[in-house]
Each structure stands twice: as C-alpha cells, then as structure tokens.
Amino acid sequence: MSEKVSPSVIRRLPRYHRFLKELLQSNIQRISSRELSEKMRLTASQIRQDFNCFGEFGQQGYGYNVELLYTEIGRILGLEDAKTMIQIGVGNLGKAIVSHLDFSSCGFSLIGLFDQDPKLIGRKIAKLTIQDTTTLAAFCRQHHPTAAVLCIPEEAAQQLSKTLVESGVQCFWNFSHYDLALHYDDILVENVHITDSLMTLGYLASNPT
Amino acid sequence: MSEKVSPSVIRRLPRYHRFLKELLQSNIQRISSRELSEKMRLTASQIRQDFNCFGEFGQQGYGYNVELLYTEIGRILGLEDAKTMIQIGVGNLGKAIVSHLDFSSCGFSLIGLFDQDPKLIGRKIAKLTIQDTTTLAAFCRQHHPTAAVLCIPEEAAQQLSKTLVESGVQCFWNFSHYDLALHYDDILVENVHITDSLMTLGYLASNPT
DNA sequence: TAGATTGTTAATCGATTAACAATC
DNA sequence: TAGATTGTTAATCGATTAACAATC
C-alpha cells in the first residue's frame, strides 16, 4: 500500500474523512482537489500529495469520486477492522467518553469497562457492566484486548498501565498526564492532553499577533 | 518579548510547563538542557532554541533555574491573567469538562454555564448555576466574556456561535465538529477533535511499521 | 480534439539538529 | 583558571507549495 507515510499526513486523514462524509451527505458525487482545498483551507497541491501517499484515487480531467475516496480513507484508517478496546476509569471524563463517543465509527469495539470505585462497579453503561480493576489482568488474559483508554489520574495510570502492558495490551489512548511512552518500548500511545489545548488557546489570547 | 513564535514552539510550551512543575515538586532546583532533553525525549538543541524565543533564561556553565523557568513559561502562556470564559453545553462531555478541569490553572476563569435543556437549567455545578442559552446574548452584553467553550452538537454550535461572535466573544475552545474558523474571520479557534485522535491511534494500530 | 485535473517532480519554505564561540 | 553549558549561527532535514507533463 505505501512505504512510509509522514505523521503530518496521517494526522490529516481523519479530517479528510469528516469532510468527505459531509460531501457525501450533501449528495456531492465528485470533487476536484481545488474545490476541496477551498472548503478545507488547504492547498490543492497538498491534498493531491496526501492522497497519493496511498494510491491513485483520482482521475485526470475529472477529479475524485467522493464515495470512493471516503471509503478508501476509511479503509486506510482501519475503520473496517474493529480493534478490541477496554476502558479504564468511568469517572466524570470516562463517563463522558463512553456515552458520548462512537467507538465503532473510529475502528474500535469497546468490550470492557473498569473502575476501582466500589460505587461504580456493577453499574451498566453502554451495554457494559463496570468491572473491578483488580480483575483487569485476568480479563486481558482471556480476551486479549488490543487497546485501552486510560481515563484515570496520573498515579492510577502509572500502576494500571504496568498491569496492562504486562498483559499484552499494546495501544493506549491516554487521557492521564502519565506518559507511558516514556516508560515502555514497543507500545503505541496517543496522548490527549486536553489542558495543553486550553493553554495554547490561552497563549494565543494573551499574546495577540 | 518576541517577534514571531512558530506554532510548533507554542504547542510545546504546555508540555514544558508540566515537566518543570514536576521537577519543582521533586525539589530539583536546576537542570541543563541535556538533562531535560533526556526526560522529555527531545534534543537539547531544540529545548535551548525554544526557550530562546522568549528570552535568555539560562546561565552558561550552570543550566536553567527550574523555578524561574517554570514561572516564566507560565507567564508566557498567560496563566497569570485570568481570561473570562463561559461554557455552552453541560451534557455528558460538558459536565466532565466543568467538573474535571481546573480552568484557573490554564489561565481562564469560568464565569457562566449555559444549556438549552430545561432539565439542566437552574442546576448548580462548580459554584455556577446553569443558565438558559436564550439569555446568552444578554449575558455577553453585560459581562463581555473573552472566550467560550463549546460542548454542544454541530447544529447547536452553528447557531450559538453566531450569537457569540456577534456578541463580541473572540476565542473559542471548540469540542463540536462545526469549525467556526472556516466561517468567521478575526476569531481565535482551538478545535478539539477527540475522535480524530482515536482514529489516528486506530491507523497506527492497523498499519504497523 | 480541447479543457480540465490529476500524479509527480522540482523549488521553496520552515523546523530541527549540529556545531561552536561566548561566558558563567 | 578549567569545565560546563548556554545562546546563536550554520547545516540538515522534512514538509509544503509550485509547476507541468501525462491523461482522462
């Protein structure tokens, strides 16, 4: 499919996917790189370069077939093979994520919810019963989840990520400030530092250009 | 202070701030760019370049004073001048944000909560009473908030952002998929596309290197 | 065929890394 | 002073943009 795709291209894929979905919903069947560039505020050159990392999806003199491109990018993103995922932590943030987010449309299938709070254990959210974190290792041995979402504080993340890594979980979507990637090799970590985003906005607001 | 700081440097500031805070809490008083580079997995060169965008905070032969550097970066990020902010939407995600996040440590002061759900209006979270979105314009006229967090669906974001922009709100922390920046000029928008982050992880998991 | 638009190469721009003189 | 480490310039690397031949 491709040799080596640069991180910046990869980070643009979900946005392309979103825009194409919208076009599709508006019944637009084809689009040129120039038209798309105006909608997305990118250059047409960049769009063509980006798509060409993965194949030749366009047609000279015509442009791109929206549906085909949408499907292709979905396939590239791996949305079609549902990777199993468990979520650790169902506090405020965790609850928002599990009830707000459609995992399956992102290429994941949520198969387990864990928390250490006795008040939460046994409750049901999104068809899943919250389990005790002490049973995490046993669960992983049995179900081999590919990925884990960490919606827990830094200290808990430090402890539980050890258990998870040792149990074979290799991908982490990490909302805690504990950066696993600095402590383990051969794992995939996507950190979501939501406060970094707010601070960046704050910087821009405080330092007008 | 500085002529023009590149976006990539700005995006690294919150992370520096976090690492320095941790060092400070461990009672480490000074650090060299090399030591910090090992902890953060950056090059020492980059660290020195980054800091030098804002001034000369180090001392040859010694390194950097951690407390001073921490304070300076906080100041650069504008953490000291609390910018007023209102939050629109107190559903699952909104509730998580308002109860989970310390706005003041990010340079903002939350002064209003709004929702359109009658069941939520009047309730109190984090010392604030949830108000009706129909009163938004009036509130803005009176209090002139600098920024707004949008924790609402795309359609609501489209409508309410119009009201907000017309009422003089200039900064947006946007959790919806409606990108205001494409529709208004002279506003500051920080988009948080949480699903993009998950899809990126999914891509990396599905396309191993 | 003529017009349009891609795929792709070349040129430019910006960001990161390396090197080293300045200096504490 | 000698050693260490910064601030800063120069070299490298990568990503974006421009240009254009290929082709639908």
Image (cartoon, coloured by chain):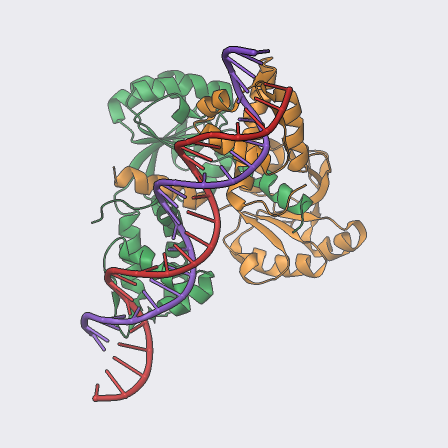
Chain colours: A green, B orange, C red, D purple
User: Which residue occupies 58% across, 51% down?
Assistant: B189
Locate residue A68 relative to residue A208 in the image: left or right: left
User: Which residue occupies 44% across, 60% down?
Assistant: A42
Locate residue A67 relative to residue B176 in the image: left or right: left
Which quadrant: the C terminus of chain B? top left
User: Which residue occupies 28% across, 23% down?
Assistant: A168
Front-lying residue, A15 or B34: B34
The x and y percentages for residue B7 are 53, 45
How many badges with numbers are in the image?
Answer: 0
The x and y percentages for residue B113 are 68, 44
Quarter-wise, where is residue B2 in the image?
A: top right
User: Which residue occupies 34% across, 44% down?
Assistant: A104
Residue B173 seen in this snapshot = yes
Quarter-wise, where is residue B66 in the image?
A: top right
Question: Compared to A165, does B80 lie above or below?
Answer: below
Front-lying residue, D23 or A127: D23
Front-lying residue, B87 or B14: B14
The x and y percentages for residue A51 are 30, 57
Residue A116 seen in this snapshot = no
Which quadrant: the N terminus of chain B? top right
Question: Compared to B72, does B172 lie above or below?
Answer: below
Residue at the farthest right position: B142
Question: Compared to A47, does A168 lie above or below?
Answer: above
Locate residue A40 relative to residue B202 in the image: left or right: right
Quarter-wise, where is residue A146 in the image?
A: top left
The x and y percentages for residue A14 are 38, 50
Front-lying residue, B7 or B105: B7
